[in-house]
Image (cartoon, rainbow, N blue to C red):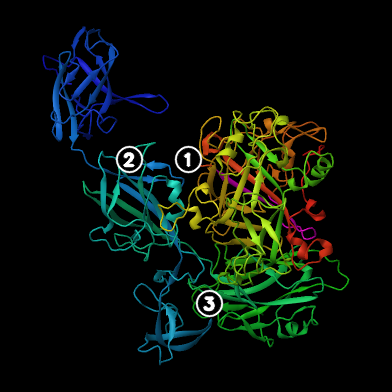
């Protein structure tokens, strides 16, 4: 600060204190100006309080002179108030300091809009207090947020929307050319532009950036454009089967002012003189207004969702009281390879696009710069296909081809293989060899001549001849061509040229035949690897060379899979054991219903009833060969077509609250039915189009009994909790009288209290029943506000299945509803309505782990699961892991049949220290050598003999206050044990009409986990 009465004697710095309490000193801009506010609203009265109406900055004042300074500071200077823990009038010794708080609070009648500047003396030095007063108004604030709704960056002036890697094709033009015989083969020469490609014989050739044909030779057979780079264009049609995904950034607009703010419009403006325009977009009606991010997060990425229309009014944003905000998604989808400056993208060489996002309000407009970058990815040049009775299937490098129609009677089953170059391949490729290797290679034959193909003619019922099917416009096979003439791979091989072959006319290379000898021992699954070897060529069809002079080879490998009568078709998943892991730090643990033999023992002793046995029936349609056309149960809507990549469909489970009680003790009172054969045709539910459904069949929704959250709650000893539903009271989940049974004020000592059930509904996450009314089309209401009203749920046509028994259902919304010990108006802590929340999840028979490629199933879609912190793992004992450890509360924690037992053993078959599942994991326990740690969670694929399968799922409670501390921000895992029942199977195997039994039968105990067995498990 400049001295008013002499040299500088006092030094002032601004004090910054971070969230960890660390203090940092920041120098003043010009050593003498204390900038207290850059914008504070003028208070209109005593009710105007808080950070919008006053701004406080903390300063440190230090005497840097060699003599004592007399400090005489006023408590108020205009709209500035000065405070200190020490006296404002004092002597400050040399090199000593004190902390000064300055508050700027402009009031109506005392301050005017604009900058206010006041001078003060600190010691002998003159300083200036500066604050900016604002008239009361709305004030827009634009922030960048993450997919889980947390603010990543506030008041941004630049947004990086994405970096997009695109596939590109060489641009082509038609030319009239002469043909010349050259040493490397026939070539084009003397090419001129084609006047009319529709009526004249012209060649379609890739072109240079100057428009010259690539591949043209001169009189000496030398290439005219030897070093030319082809002109490239983005593969917008996806003909290379490389999906073009846009970059996205979620933004939130909030009103940081003190009066309502009107948003007039939001628009994207191009940068002046930009060479690339229209690369950024904000779809019309794509601004969504909500109080909570979780209410609209599904809509932000939905293609058909419609948001609010302008003008939009936002109230002042007040944390914890009114957090109404406008959410929008800005997209970046490049349509060309140019950047804003005219530079062109290349492989590994990105270009940058720029534009401005402008928000027009009834106050000051705000704007921010949008940026995105584009680069070209090297697409695989080779494409491999099989033609089947349901269409042409492309198999990616590293992918798998399941051979269909394999049964125990199959002797031969053959399928034709074709190849072509991708549209983006700039140069030819020579196919030199095809071979089959692997553990079951002897069961697969490569037939590469007309004679070999014709020789394989299995008898009726014993397989399939190799043929090229003819399909009509609806995809139905109308004929077959058995006269197959594959090309020859005799030296030097067969050349595939760019732009020569389409999917319709690509060459046949041979047939893959699954062959099983009469004396060969039969097994369920056969696997081998088919590998194509090729040499990359120049435009002159000479081999490209490696640095050592050898030809540049490439390989393309796919997995061949043949399964004996794999599980497929319309199936009934009979769930007979449900395990849940709730990782609340206060009571982290694991619970499960025991195996049925424990129930039977307790039923015999009068401790339980047969109606306590859990049994849930789910409609799952498994289509591993992608050949089925699937409709809804009434047959009115097609939900899946053949050959579209969807290979499993789960019909929605609508378990909503009803006022009904049932005479049948095995039907769940106050819970809706998922199927009712007594209803009119077209309204019966999930099994309406299934075969062999007995008359009068009715099936329950999903209802999960939870002992620990039943009365008297998880904080009481295990022996005081109800072990079975018959040990507590099944209340009407929406009845105040029922809720009282969770409170000791209304339950007499020794009397049973209320049971806790999670009533589970499942459908696609974008179902209208899962979306709030603030979102167009959203119909979510608390379940107790819509008793007896069915939910609008979408079919889960989002599944994948494979012939080796794995099934994954993606993009699932799982709605859990019901009063619990913590979630009811009479609860012991936070008095809230019954639990009613929707999770975004997936169920899989595989392992819970992040995607490694976009082609992998996304089994962890919930943005609340922090994948970087490995929140998807089960923490057994690690005190440093983000999740609470389960072993302390899951070891020697229960008694079954008079034996001390550990509940962690319910999941012992499903956890491992490694992703592949080869290293067992477990809690340290008597009789084992486990050391705990952190484990992966696995399911079990469908067993080919027993049809037993296990599904696993991970999710996490959101930040909503309605979840209470019991589930707020708490990770949850569910494990579902059961088996797939075939309604066309034999009744003596408990299939056929027995699939629809709601009372467990003998087969239902197969695959259940007992914690009384395997106590000597060692790693």
Frontmost residue, 482 versus 405: 405
Look at discs 2 and 3 and give the one toward the viewer. Answer: 2
The crowding category of the residue bearing disc 1, from other C-alpha atoms within 10 Å (few below 14, some 14 to 19, many at least 20), is some
Q: Earlier in the sequence, mark 2 or mark 3?
A: 2
The crowding category of the residue bearing disc 2, from other C-alpha atoms within 10 Å (few below 14, some 14 to 19, many at least 20), is many
Query: Quadrant of the rendered structure where residue 592 is?
Result: top right
Q: Is residue 34 above or below residue 536?
A: above
Q: Which mark is residue 871?
A: none
Q: CA distance from mark 1 to mark 2?
A: 17 Å
Q: CA distance from mark 1 to mark 3?
A: 65 Å
Q: Which residue is mark 3?
A: 541
Say if the magenta span includes residue 942. Answer: yes
Look at discs 1 and 3 and give the one toward the viewer. Answer: 1
Query: Quadrant of the rendered structure where residue 494 is?
Result: bottom right
Q: Secondary structure at mark 1?
A: loop
Q: Is residue 823 above or below residue 289?
A: above
Q: Is residue 840 above or below residue 591?
A: below
Q: Earlier in the sequence, mark 1 or mark 3?
A: 3
Frontmost residue, 312 versus 119: 312
Q: Which residue is mark 2?
A: 317
Image coordinates for residue 188, horizontal then vertical, percent: 45, 85
Q: Is residue 686 left or right of residue 604?
A: left
Residue 981 appears in the figure: yes
Residue numbers of the magenta segment: 939-956
Q: Secondary structure at mark 2?
A: loop
Q: Which residue is mark 1?
A: 960
Say if the magenta span includes residue 545. Answer: no
**Which quadrant holds the N terminus?**
top left
């Amino acid at each position: 600060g400049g001295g008013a009465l002499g040299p500088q004697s006092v030094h002032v710095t601004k004090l910054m204190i971070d969230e960890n309490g660390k203090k940092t000193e920041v120098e003043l801009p010009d050593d003498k100006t204390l900038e207290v506010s850059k914008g504070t609203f003028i208070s209109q009265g005593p009710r105007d309080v808080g950070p919008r109406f006053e701004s406080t900055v903390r300063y440190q004042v230090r005497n840097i002179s060699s003599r004592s300074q007399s400090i005489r500071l006023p408590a108020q200077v205009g709209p500035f108030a000065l405070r200190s823990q020490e006296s404002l009038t004092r002597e400050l010794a040399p090199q000593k300091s004190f902390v000064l708080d300055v508050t700027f609070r402009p009031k109506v009648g005392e301050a005017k809009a604009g900058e206010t500047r006041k001078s003060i003396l600190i010691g002998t030095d003159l300083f200036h207090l500066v604050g900016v007063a604002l008239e009361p108004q709305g004030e827009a604030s634009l922030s960048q947020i993450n997919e889980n709704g947390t603010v990543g960056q506030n008041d941004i002036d630049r947004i990086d929307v994405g970096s997009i890697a695109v596939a590109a094709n060489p641009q082509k033009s038609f030319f009239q050319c002469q043909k010349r015989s050259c040493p490397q083969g026939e070539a084009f020469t003397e090419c001129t532009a084609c006047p009319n490609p529709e009526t004249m014989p012209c060649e379609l050739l890739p072109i240079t950036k100057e428009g010259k044909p690539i591949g043209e030779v001169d009189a000496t057979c030398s290439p005219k454009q030897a070093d030319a780079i082809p002109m490239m264009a983005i593969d917008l049609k996806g003909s290379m089967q490389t999906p073009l995904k846009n970059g996205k950034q979620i933004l939130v607009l909030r009103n940081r002012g003190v009066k309502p703010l009107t948003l007039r419009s939001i628009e994207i403006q191009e940068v002046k003189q930009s060479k690339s325009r229209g690369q950024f977009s904000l779809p019309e009606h794509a601004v969504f207004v909500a109080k909570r991010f979780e209410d609209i997060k599904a809509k932000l990425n939905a293609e058909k969702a419609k948001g609010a229309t302008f003008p939009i009014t936002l109230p002042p944003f007040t944390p914890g009281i009114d957090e109404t905000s406008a959410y929008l998604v800005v997209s970046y989808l490049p349509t060309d390879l140019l950047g804003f400056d005219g530079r062109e993208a290349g492989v590994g060489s990105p270009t940058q696009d720029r534009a401005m996002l402008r928000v027009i309000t009834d106050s000051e407009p705000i704007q921010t710069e949008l940026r995105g970058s584009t680069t070209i990815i090297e697409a695989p040049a080779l494409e491999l296909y099989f033609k089947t009775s349901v269409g042409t299937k492309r198999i990616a490098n590293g992918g798998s081809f399941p051979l269909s129609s394999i049964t125990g009677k199959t002797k031969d089953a053959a399928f034709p293989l074709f190849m072509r170059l991708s549209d983006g391949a700039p140069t030819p490729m020579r196919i030199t060899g095809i071979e089959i290797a692997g553990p079951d290679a002897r069961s697969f034959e490569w037939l590469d001549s007309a004679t070999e193909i014709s020789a394989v003619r299995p008898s009726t019922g014993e397989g399939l001849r190799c043929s090229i099917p003819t399909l009509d416009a609806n995809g139905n096979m109308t004929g077959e061509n058995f006269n197959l003439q594959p090309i020859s791979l005799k030296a030097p091989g067969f050349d595939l040229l760019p732009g020569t072959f389409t999917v319709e006319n690509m060459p046949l290379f041979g047939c893959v035949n699954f062959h099983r000898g009469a004396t060969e021992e039969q097994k369920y699954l056969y696997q081998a690897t088919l590998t194509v070897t090729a040499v990359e060529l120049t435009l002159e069809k000479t081999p490209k060379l490696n640095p050592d002079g050898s030809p540049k080879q490439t390989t393309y490998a796919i997995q061949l899979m043949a399964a004996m009568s794999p599980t497929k078709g319309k199936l009934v998943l009979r769930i007979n054991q449900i395990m849940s892991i709730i990782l609340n730090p206060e009571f982290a643990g694991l619970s499960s219903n025991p195996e049925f033999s424990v129930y039977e023992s307790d039923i015999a002793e009068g401790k339980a009833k047969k109606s306590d046995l859990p049994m849930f029936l789910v409609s799952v349609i498994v289509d591993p060969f992608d050949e089925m056309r699937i409709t809804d149960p009434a047959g009115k809507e097609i939900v899946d077509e053949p050959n579209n990549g969807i290979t499993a469909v789960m019909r929605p489970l609508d378990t909503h609250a009803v006022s009904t009680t049932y005479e049948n003790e095995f039907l769940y009172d106050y819970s809706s039915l998922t199927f009712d054969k007594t209803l009119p045709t077209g309204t019966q539910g999930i099994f309406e189009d299934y075969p062999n459904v007995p008359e009068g069949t009715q099936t329950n929704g999903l209802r999960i009994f939870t002992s620990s959250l039943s009365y008297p709650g998880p904080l009481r000893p295990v022996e005081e909790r109800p072990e079975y539903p018959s040990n507590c009271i099944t209340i009407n989940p929406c009845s105040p009288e029922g809720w009282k049974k969770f409170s000791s004020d209304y339950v007499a000592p020794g009397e049973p209290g209320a049971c806790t059930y999670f009533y589970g509904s499942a459908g696609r996450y974008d179902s209208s029943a899962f979306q709030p009314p603030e979102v167009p089309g959203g119909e979510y209401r608390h379940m107790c506000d819509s008793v007896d009203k069915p939910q609008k749920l979408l079919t889960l046509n989002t599944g994948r299945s494979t012939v080796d028994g794995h099934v994954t259902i993606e993009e699932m919304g799982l709605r859990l509803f019901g009063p619990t010990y913590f979630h009811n108006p009479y609860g012991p802590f936070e008095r809230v309505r019954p639990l009613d929340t929707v999770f975004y999840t997936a169920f899989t028979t595989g392992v819970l782990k992040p995607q490694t490629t976009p082609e992998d199933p996304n089994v962890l879609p919930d943005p609340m699961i922090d994948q970087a912190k490995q929140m998807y793992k089960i923490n057994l004992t690690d005190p440093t892991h983000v999740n609470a450890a389960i072993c302390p509360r899951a070891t020697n924690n229960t008694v079954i049949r008079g034996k001390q037992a550990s509940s962690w053993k319910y999941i012992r078959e499903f956890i491992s220290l490694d992703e592949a599942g080869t290293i067992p994991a477990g809690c340290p326990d008597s009789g084992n050598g486990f050391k705990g740690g952190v484990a992966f969670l696995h399911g079990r694929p469908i067993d080919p003999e027993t049809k037993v399968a296990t599904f696993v799922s991970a999710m996490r409670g959101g930040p909503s206050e309605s979840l209470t501390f019991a589930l707020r921000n708490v990770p949850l895992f569910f494990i579902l044990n059961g088996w797939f029942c075939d309604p066309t199977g034999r009744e003596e195997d408990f299939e056929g009409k027995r699939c629809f039994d709601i009372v467990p039968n003998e087969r239902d105990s197969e695959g259940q986990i007992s914690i009384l067995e395997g106590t000597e498990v060692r790693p």
